[in-house]
Image (spheres, helix red, strand yellow):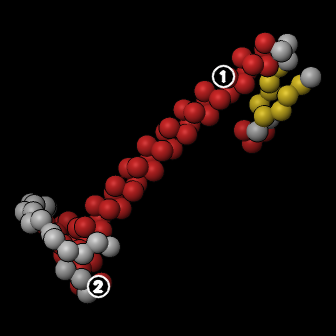
């Protein structure tokens, strides 16, 4: 975790969330600001992972279309097998 210069931020949260932040801070023996920083970092990683997953899923669909077009040009067919794997029939 990067230490050094920090920016000050004031946020307003509902009481239940505030109690959860306090509880996590006390349990971990860290300041509440550290709990918030870690939560935001986790949220960012989760968001980036979701974007990557969406991109990979889109690429996989494009790869299937490209493979089908290529095999079609060769006069062959592509059949998806169980488990999402592909096999070709010659």
Q: Is residue 6 left or right of residue 43?
A: left
For the point 85% across and 13% down, the residue is 75
Considering the numbered disc 1 on the image, is that residue within a helix, a strand or a loop?
helix
- Specify the label residue 27 is tagged with: 2
Q: How far from the left and from the top, in percent, is residue 68?
A: 73, 21
**In the rendering, at what x and y percent does residue 67 appear?**
72, 24
Q: Position of residue 44 (x, y in %)?
A: 34, 55
In front: mark 2 or mark 1?
A: 1
Q: Which tag, 2 or 1, sits closer to the chain's start?
A: 2
Reply above or below: 35 against 52.
below
Circle 2: element type: helix
Distance of label 2 from label 1 (alpha carbons): 52 Å
- Of 45 and 19, which appears nearest the observer? 45
Residue 62 found in image quarter:
top right
If the image is split into quadrants, where does the C terminus sit? top right
Q: Which residue is mark 1?
A: 65
Considering the image in quadrants, where does the N terminus appear?
A: bottom left
Please tell me how crowded label 1 is: few (under 14), some (14-19), or many (20+) other residues with Cα within 10 Å: few
Give the residue drawn at x 12%, y 65%.
7
Q: Is residue 46 above or below residue 59?
A: below
Residue 60: x and y in percent read 62, 34
């Amino acid at each position: 975790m990067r230490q050094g210069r920090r920016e000050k931020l004031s946020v307003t949260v509902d009481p239940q969330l505030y109690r959860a932040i306090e509880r996590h801070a006390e349990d971990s023996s860290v300041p509440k600001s550290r709990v918030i920083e870690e939560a935001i970092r986790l949220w960012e990683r989760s968001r980036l992972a979701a974007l990557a997953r969406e991109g990979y899923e889109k690429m996989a669909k494009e790869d299937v279309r490209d493979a089908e077009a290529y095999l079609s040009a060769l006069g062959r067919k592509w059949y998806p097998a169980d488990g999402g794997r592909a096999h070709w029939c010659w």
